[in-house]
Image (cartoon, rainbow, N blue to C red):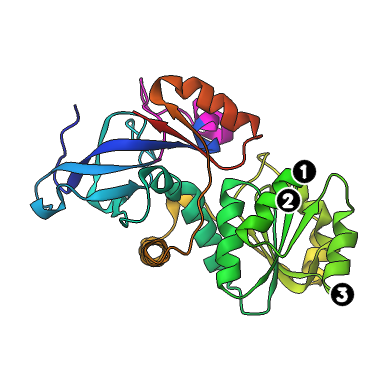
Amino acid sequence: MPQPGPGEVRVRIRASGANPSDWKTRKGGSGRKLIAPPVIPHSDGAGDIDAVGEGVPASRIGERVWIWNGQWKRASGTAAEYIALPAQQAVPLPANVSYDEGACLGIPGFTAWQAMRLAALQPGDTVLVQGGAGSVGHYAIQLAKLRGATVLATVSSEAKAAHARAAGADHAIDYRREDLGARVAELTGGRGVDCIIEMDLAANAASYPKLLRPHGRVVVYGMSGAEATLPTMWLMQNSIGLQFFLIYEIAQADRDAGVRELTDLLAAGKLKHTIALRLPLAEIARAHDLVEGGTLMGNVVLAP
């Protein structure tokens, strides 16, 4: 049973979210080594504060919260009955949002929000969301529509196309059956998109000359390899901006702004959440395998 230290709270976990970064870290991917023996995985979760440490108001006891960076640079994550962590990492969860939904916010929701902040979309802009049926893509589509953008989304099946459209995508492009560049040109009148929200730079960068308008921009939150080959001459000649970020390490000012906006949107019921599967914590190995398989649409949550 963890005890909250100064400035910390203890949360009784009701739902723990499994993300791709969890199985990648477990396997030593992306240069992420396990920091301790053992490690309790998972950054995301939701539950109730049942104890507070020195310096934290006792009034927070009983508060419903969602958690971000639960296991980032710490040995103990949310895949447990309890977690103790800094109080700011336990964010009040609006009453109209379930614990399962709260367990989807730390990485998927926050990544989509930060991507939108960096994209700086204006009403009328056109944005291409790569992987529109993924957990991040699902929120990115919604946030882009709330900013007044026209949203194109890449998908790999008709079922995923329907999922992206249900989130608000104006057009879903099946890159396995359609010529992505030709379809984007058709949908934008040959102009290209203003921005790409990129989940895999290494796999997709070669297609940018067919997708982006001059002075367009790409916001990158993920990649499948440690290095990527870029069409650098074309990028330079067309003044394309590339912006990278790691959701675990965003600036505190960004984190605070994201918490405020996400809280407002959640309270107003303006975000849709998709739970693909809910499993008992004892089936965590199966959950990791399913997330790694990449076939599910939505988040996998575990109930301690």
Does the CB distance between marks 2 and 1 fall below 8 Å?
yes
x%, y% of residue 48? 24, 43
The rendered magenta stretch, by its main secondary structure, is classed as loop
Q: Determine the secondary structure under disc 2.
A: helix
Furthest-bottom residue in this view: 123
Q: Determine the secondary structure under disc 1.
A: loop
Which residue is painted at 68% across and 79% down in the image?
Answer: 124
Of circles 2 and 3, the one toward us is 2
Q: Which residues are magenta?
A: 23-44
93 or 29, which is in the foreground? Answer: 93
Position of 242 relative to 179 (above/below): below
Pointer 1: what residue?
157
Pointer 3: what residue?
189
Mark number displayed over residue 106: none
Position of 155 relative to 150 (above/below): above
Q: Amino acid at mark 3?
A: Gly
**Is residue 28 rendered magenta in the image?**
yes
User: Quick one: label 2 or label 3, which is nearer the N terminus?
Assistant: 2
Q: Determine the secondary structure under disc 3.
A: loop
